[in-house]
Image (tube, rainbow, N blue to C red):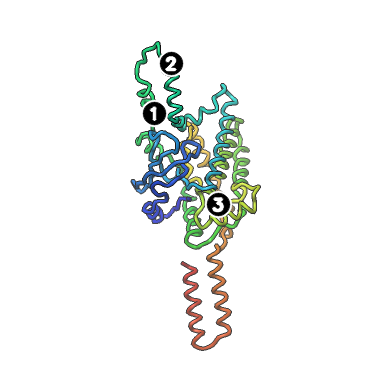
Amino acid sequence: MAPPPPEEVEEQEIINHKFKDGEKVLCFHGPLLYEAKCLKAQVKDKTTKYYIHYSGWNKNWDEWVPESRVLKYNEVNMQKRRDLEVINSKERKKSGKGGAKKDPKDRESSVLPPQEKTPKQKNKDAEASAASTSNETPTEPPKKKRMLKAEQNVETEEEYIQKIEIKIKIADELKHRIVEDWNCINREGKLASLPARIPVETLISDYVKQRTSVKGMTPNKESAIVEIMNGVKEYFNVMLGPQLLYDLELPQYNKLISEYPDSTPCQLYGVSYLLRLFTMLGGILVYTPLNEDSIHLISTNITDLQKYIAKWASTFFSNSDYIDGPEKKSIKKEIKDTKIKADYIDGPEKKSIKKEIKDTKIKAEV
C-alpha cells in the first residue's frame, strides 16, 4: 500500500475504497497491530478514513482511522503483527533498564483497554465486589465509574485531527525521485533490480559513520543517532511487505524472500523504498507513546538523513536500478519474434506484419 505521489492517483484511490464495509482487517493502534473490523468508510478533504471496531474490545474504542493504519488480514501481515510485538517487547526491556521496574503490561494498557469480560467473569467480579463493599457506601455506582473511565480514554475527533497533522517532511530535492519511482513501476511496467545495488542497511550504516565522526559529537548524541537509525531500519523491515510495495511488486517480493530467507528487507531493498517509508512514517509515529520532544528528535534526524541522500543522489539513484517487469519482457519478445517473421515474408503480408510491430510498440509504451 505505497502512497502514489501523482495527484490523479490519489483522487482515484479516494473514490475506490481499499477496504469494504464489514471486512476483517488488521489495524495499528499505538505501536502494535490488532484484529479489527472495518464498519464504514468516508472521504473528507481528499482523505479516506475508516470507522474501525477492534475485535474483542468494547465498542467505546471504535474510532475513525486513516488508511495508512489499516492492513489486509492475511498471513504476511499477521507475521508483521508478531514482529511488531517482538520489537515492542525489546523496547519495553530497554526502557526498564535505567529506572524503576515497570509492569510488562503498562505499555499495552496505554494503547487499548482490557478486553471485555465474558458474562461468567462479570458475575464473579460482581460477587467479589459485593462481598468487599458490603460494609461500605460507594460514592457512585461501579457501572458509572467504568463508563466515565472509558469516556476519558476514548479518542475524540479533535484529538484525531491533531494527530494526522504531524508529518515527516520530504526534502524538495527528493520529491521528484518519488514521482519518478512511481512512474517507473506503475506506468512503465518496470521493477527494481534486486537485491539493491546499495541496500538501505548500507546507506544508513554509512550515514551513521559520517554523522558520528564530526567534531563535537558527544556520546549521548551518538547514542541517540544510532538508536533512531536502528528504529528506522526496524520500521522499514516491518512495513515493507504490507505497506510500501505496489501491486506489481508483490510477486517479486514473495520470490525474493524465498530466495534470501536469512536476509531482511533492509539488506535487499534500496533508497527508493526508504523514501516511500518517509511518506508514511509520520502517520504511524503519532500513534506511538512518544512525547513531542522524542518525535521532534526523530523528525530532525530523518530530515538530516534526507539531506545526506540528496547530497549523494548521483550515487544512490541510477536508471540501471530498474529492470523490465514480466509484462514488458513479454511484449519485447513479441516484437522480436514478429520482426524475425517479417524477414522471411514479402508482399502484402509484410505490410500487415509491420503494422503489427507498430501496434505492439505502442502497447509497450502504454
Identified by mark 3, the residue type is Ala
Residue 166 occupies which quadrant of the picture? top left
* 1 vs 3, front mark: 1
Q: Read off the residue under disc 2.
A: 131
Q: Read off the residue under disc 1.
A: 150
Residue 274's disc number: none
Q: Read off the residue under disc 3.
A: 313
Question: Number of marks in the image?
Answer: 3
Residue 120 occupies which quadrant of the picture? top left
Observer able to see residue 216: no
SS of the residue under disc 1: helix
Identified by mark 2, the residue type is Ala
Identified by mark 1, the residue type is Ala
User: Contact, CB < 8 Å: mark 1 with mark 2?
Assistant: no
* 1 vs 2, front mark: 2
**Residue 3, position in %: x, y?**
45, 50
Q: Give the camera-side residue of 165 and 330.
A: 330
State the separation of the CA atoms marked 1 and 3: 50 Å
SS of the residue under disc 2: helix
**Residue 144, position in %: x, y?**
35, 23
At 54% from the left and 42% from the top, the residue drawn is 235
